[in-house]
Image: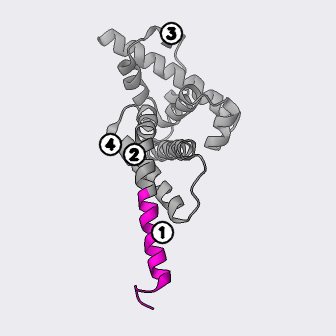
Amino acid sequence: MGWGTVEDRTAINRDTEGAAELETLYDATLDHVYGYILLRVGGHIATAEDLTQETYLALAEQIRSGDLPPAPLPWLLRVARNKVVDFYRRQERTAARITGWSAQAEQVPAASPGIDRFADRELIRTALASTPPAQRIALVLRYLDGLTVAEIAAELGKSEHAVESLLARGRATLRAQLTENEAIA
């Protein structure tokens, strides 16, 4: 059975059609997917590019399997969210191995000014990037993706109480970073 058979030509045509379909979807959705990821990784371009590439590899696999999602953009954004969550999980595991448990992470600083007074998005992005990964992903899922505490708990495989704790510590860390950065500026 050589490359000249009807079955082989059909497979080649199917792969060519899949490549054209992937290219069309890529061109139509790249700005949305990349922007979605870039915002959620604190503006870190290399990370956003890597996660975007992983997202489109998943789409290529879907097309190759013949199971193209009926609404590609929402599907891609869901895959992108999963990639971002996985990225933060890896960061959290790495940070835990490097630093171990810290009692300081459990301390919540005294109340400080609300985040809404910080209008500079770059300042917020920098402060968010400096929060611990577990807190950062909880904040991102809650305030950028609009998920409820219960949805975040399901997404991260944690209890609702643990998510509420992460959010409280994350807000406190973010406020402290913003206040510190404002004092420096």
Position of the C terminus, as image quadrant, is top left
For label 2, the SS is: helix
Q: Amino acid at mark 3?
A: Ser
Position of the N terminus, as image quadrant, is bottom left
- Label 2, on which residue? 27
For label 1, the SS is: helix
Looking at the image, tell me whether mark 2 or mark 4 is earlier in sequence order.
2
Q: Amino acid at mark 2?
A: Asp
Magenta stretch bounds: 1-20
> Mark 1 and 2 residues: CB-CB less than 8 Å, in contact?
no
- Label 4, on which residue? 46
- Label 1, on which residue? 14
> Mark 2 and 4 residues: CB-CB less than 8 Å, in contact?
no
How many neighbours does mark 2 have within 10 angstroms: few (below 14), some (14-19), or many (20 or more)?
few
Q: Amino acid at mark 4?
A: Ala
Disc 3 to disc 4, how far (Cα)?
33 Å
Q: Is residue 13 magenta?
A: yes
| Magenta-drawn stretch, dominant element (helix, strand or loop) | helix
Looking at the image, tell me whether mark 1 or mark 4 is earlier in sequence order.
1
* Residue 172 percent coordinates (x, y): 52, 19
Which tag is nearer the camera, tag 1 or tag 3? 1
Q: Is residue 58 above or below residue 133?
A: below
Q: Is residue 5 above or below residue 20?
A: below
> Mark 3 and 4 residues: CB-CB less than 8 Å, in contact?
no
Q: Is residue 71 left or right of residue 49?
A: right
For label 3, the SS is: loop
